[in-house]
Image (spheres, rainbow, N blue to C red):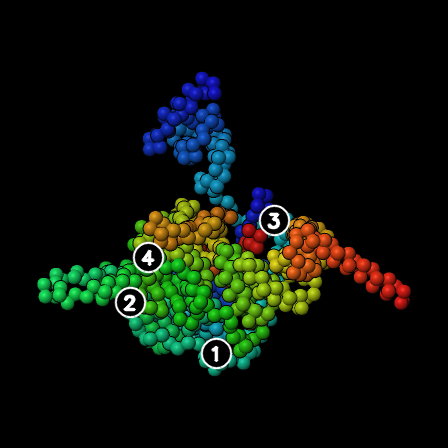
């Protein structure tokens, strides 16, 4: 790893300027296409499909919708159907078949305010159990939806009456390694991170990282929960080892600060859960690797198991843009391929090399 | 240590003040070169970079190299790098990447077409999906305060003390302490709840392959995190979908780590059935053999590996180890053999010396027998 050539390189493959503000970009599973979701200047929403072809991103389809679209996921659809679930500025959850996008396959008025974040599990062969979608909103609630049930959520995580409502910025599924177990993690604007156990319908763990939580992600959704990364507003991120939960100390964690600005996104490499990329507010990307400690748990002075956090190593970093990178998505099919969008109205396809040798 | 050095060290120690301002004297090649305090160097570098005391590009880079020497992974050394583009790579390298990408694009087109033309298997899939979660449950975001708030026992009156049953009370206290005490730590193994087989028969071949690969990847990750049992579970899942050589081989390795020699052997055998001469499987089988005391069979496997790959370092190492053990064993065996015969021969004897004699007799007898036998054979042919 000493020679510079052995390090992974982040290569800008394709860069495409768009005529709208793009909030989210996602690969369509089992294809060389990706979807961009956003907001036209005239106040409407837009979904565009691009295909990567001959070193270019070619527009395949464009659909305009009445409300700006904030986020989307393929996590709860089958590989055959590949329906995208989206959340919009008005709090609507929609599921679209992009082959015929005129009418939504599923539609629900999910929240009173903007849906900030969405995640899915149980589809694409990722995660055992039922397909479910989680949405988090400015109205302070996190709701779980089953596409087979119309109009009402299957679970609702909300602050109790009279409590101040915190803006939920991010949600992520995890722990879906059999039919029953499943967790959803939510991050809020006041730095709260809450881990809900959907099997027992209880709050399993919570902590506060002092600054707004911009993004949380489990290293994998479909395993016995292992690690969780949470990124924050002032440029720090925390990696929690979820294997050992101490009754008072909670989970062991390691934090790292490398970005000088907000870390907007964190995404784990689908082919290797210990490598992840963070995207920052100054248009930069950092590629990290988590190294496990020799022993992942130890006994504390009372003889109780307590987790031991590992370390994070920076593998590579680049600056792409002057504007925040708001979305990032690894291709589930092709290792090292990723798409990201930034607020300079640009979407980029990147290639990260040598990921299998680190 | 000379007096001068001592003084300078003392000075260094005395003036380091992390909260205060860095004195101008410290912004100096001599000082930076000698400074061993990473934190203070960071501070100096920050001052230099800020330009408050003037801009000295040489000194900045000097300070950076010094910091790199002391702490190569220091955060301050992370510099903004422009993104790499095709132009900054060598032609070959870029060509390879482009070809690779092109292949993937074509392949994914085919996959997509095949997905589209597949009949919808909705009914079968639906049967496999668990039912909808108990609808619209809600969870309070706030942590429920100590669920098991201990009720303070009320003071008993005197009459009640008469009925006091010590044993019963003790039992109750015991059971209380075991049930109500919060589990101090939850260790997430969850292995028992992980299914080790998956039914993917309703999926198309392509999807099966995807799924099997993913389960195998999960196994690899668990293996890297030293969760060998979990790794085995995921490899088993992968194998249950689509038995591949890699998954079997990897499971064998995980079984070896856990010293489950039998299971490891089974996996190796299966690989060798699928692909005779698979180097990894041979190597792993050899490991199993050496650990179960079958050094000769192990050596045989290793020699087969070395025939294919004469420079295979793992095989060379293992072979030399095995041969050493073989020698040791050979010596032990020899001793044992003598003893064995000795016991067989002199059943009932109690004299120590006679025993040895009897043993010798026995060995001689055997040698003679073999020679006789050989000569007999020779004459016959």
x then y, percent, for residue B221 = 51, 58
Which residue in the structure is indicated by mark 4?
A: B184
Residue for badge 3: B89
Q: Secondary structure at mark 3?
A: loop
Residue labelled with disc 1: B125
Residue occupying image coordinates x 41% and y 58%: A243
Picture layout, residue B54 above or below residue A316: above
- Residues at marks 4 and 1, CA–CA distance in whole angstroms: 41 Å
The subunit letter for the residue under badge 2 reads: B
Q: Earlier in the sequence, mark 2 or mark 4?
A: 2
**A75 or A225, nearer to the observer:** A225
* Mark 1, other Cα within 10 Å: few <14 / some 14–19 / many ≥20: few
Q: Compute the Cα span from label 3 to label 1.
A: 46 Å
Chain of residue at mark 3: B
Point out which mark residue B375 bears.
Answer: none
Is the residue A254 above or below the residue A51 in the image?
Answer: above
Mark 4 touches mark 1? (CB < 8 Å) = no
Q: CA distance from mark 3 to mark 4?
A: 54 Å
Mark 3 vs 1, N-terminal side: 3
Q: Are marks 3 and 1 in contact (CB under 8 Å)?
A: no
């Amino acid at each position: 790893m000493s020679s510079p050539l052995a390090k992974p390189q982040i290569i800008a493959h394709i860069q495409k300027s768009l005529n709208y503000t793009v909030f989210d970009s996602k690969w369509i599973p089992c294809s060389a296409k990706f979807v961009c979701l956003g907001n036209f200047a005239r106040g409407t929403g837009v979904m565009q499909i691009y295909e990567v072809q001959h070193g270019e991103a070619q527009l395949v389809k464009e659909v305009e919708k009445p409300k700006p679209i904030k986020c989307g996921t393929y996590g709860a659809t089958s590989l055959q159907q590949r329906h995208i679930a989206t959340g919009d500025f008005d709090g609507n959850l929609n599921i679209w078949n992009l082959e015929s996008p005129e009418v939504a396959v599923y539609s629900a008025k999910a929240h009173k305010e903007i849906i900030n974040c969405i995640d899915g599990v149980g589809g694409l062969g990722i995660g055992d159990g039922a397909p479910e979608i989680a949405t988090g909103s400015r109205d302070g609630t996190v709701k779980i939806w089953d596409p087979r049930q119309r109009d009402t959520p299957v679970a609702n995580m909300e602050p109790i009456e009279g409590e101040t409502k915190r803006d939920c910025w991010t949600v992520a599924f995890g722990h879906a390694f059999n039919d029953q177990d499943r967790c959803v993690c939510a991050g809020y604007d006041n730095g709260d991170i809450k881990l809900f156990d959907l099997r027992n319908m209880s709050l399993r763990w919570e902590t506060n990282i002092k600054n707004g939580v911009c993004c949380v992600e489990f290293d994998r959704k479909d395993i016995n929960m292992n690690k969780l990364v949470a990124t924050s507003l002032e440029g720090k991120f925390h990696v929690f080892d979820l294997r050992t939960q101490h009754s008072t100390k909670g989970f062991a964690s390691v934090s790292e600060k490398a970005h000088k600005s907000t870390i907007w996104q964190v995404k784990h490499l689908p082919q290797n859960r210990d490598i992840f990329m963070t995207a920052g507010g100054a248009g930069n990307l950092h590629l990290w690797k988590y190294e496990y400690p020799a022993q992942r748990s130890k006994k504390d002075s009372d003889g109780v198991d307590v987790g031991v956090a590992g370390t994070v190593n920076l593998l590579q970093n680049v600056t792409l843009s002057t504007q925040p990178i708001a979305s990032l998505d690894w291709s589930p099919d092709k290792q090292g391929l990723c798409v990201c969008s930034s607020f300079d109205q640009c979407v980029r396809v990147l290639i990260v090399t040598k990921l299998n040798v680190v | 240590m000379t007096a001068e050095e001592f003084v300078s060290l003392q000075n260094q120690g005395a003036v380091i003040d992390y909260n205060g301002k860095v004195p101008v004297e410290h912004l100096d090649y001599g000082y930076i070169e000698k400074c061993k305090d990473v934190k203070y160097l960071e501070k100096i570098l920050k001052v230099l970079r800020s330009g408050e005391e003037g801009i000295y590009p040489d000194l900045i880079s000097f300070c950076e190299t010094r910091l790199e020497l002391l702490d190569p992974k220091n955060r301050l050394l992370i510099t903004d790098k422009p993104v790499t583009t095709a132009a900054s790579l060598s032609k070959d390298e870029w060509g390879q990447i482009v070809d690779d990408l092109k292949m993937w694009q074509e392949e994914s087109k085919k996959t997509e077409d095949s997905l589209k033309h597949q009949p919808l298997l909705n009914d079968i899939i639906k049967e496999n999906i668990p039912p909808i979660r108990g609808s619209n449950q809600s969870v309070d975001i706030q942590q429920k305060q100590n669920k098991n708030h201990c009720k303070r026992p009320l003071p008993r009156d005197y009459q009640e003390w008469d009925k006091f049953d010590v044993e019963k009370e003790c039992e109750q206290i015991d059971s209380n302490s075991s049930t109500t005490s919060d589990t101090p730590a939850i260790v997430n193994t969850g292995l028992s709840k992980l299914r080790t087989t998956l039914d993917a028969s309703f999926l198309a071949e392509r999807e099966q392959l995807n799924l099997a690969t993913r389960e195998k990847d999960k196994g690899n990750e668990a293996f890297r995190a030293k969760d060998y049992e979990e790794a085995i579970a995921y490899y088993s899942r992968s194998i249950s979908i689509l038995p591949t050589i890699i998954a079997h081989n990897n499971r064998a390795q995980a079984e070896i780590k856990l010293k489950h020699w039998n299971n490891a052997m089974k996996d190796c055998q299966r690989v060798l059935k699928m692909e005779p001469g698979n180097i990894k499987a041979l190597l792993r089988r050899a490991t199993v053999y050496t650990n179960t005391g079958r050094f000769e069979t192990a050596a045989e496997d290793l020699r087969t590996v070395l025939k294919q790959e004469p420079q295979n370092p793992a095989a060379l190492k293992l072979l030399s180890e095995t041969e050493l053990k073989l020698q040791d064993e050979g010596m032990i065996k020899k001793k044992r053999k003598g003893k064995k015969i000795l016991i067989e021969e002199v059943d009932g004897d109690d004299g120590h010396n006679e025993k040895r004699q009897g043993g010798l007799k026995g060995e001689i007898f055997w040698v003679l027998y073999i020679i006789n036998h050989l000569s007999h054979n020779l004459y016959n042919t």
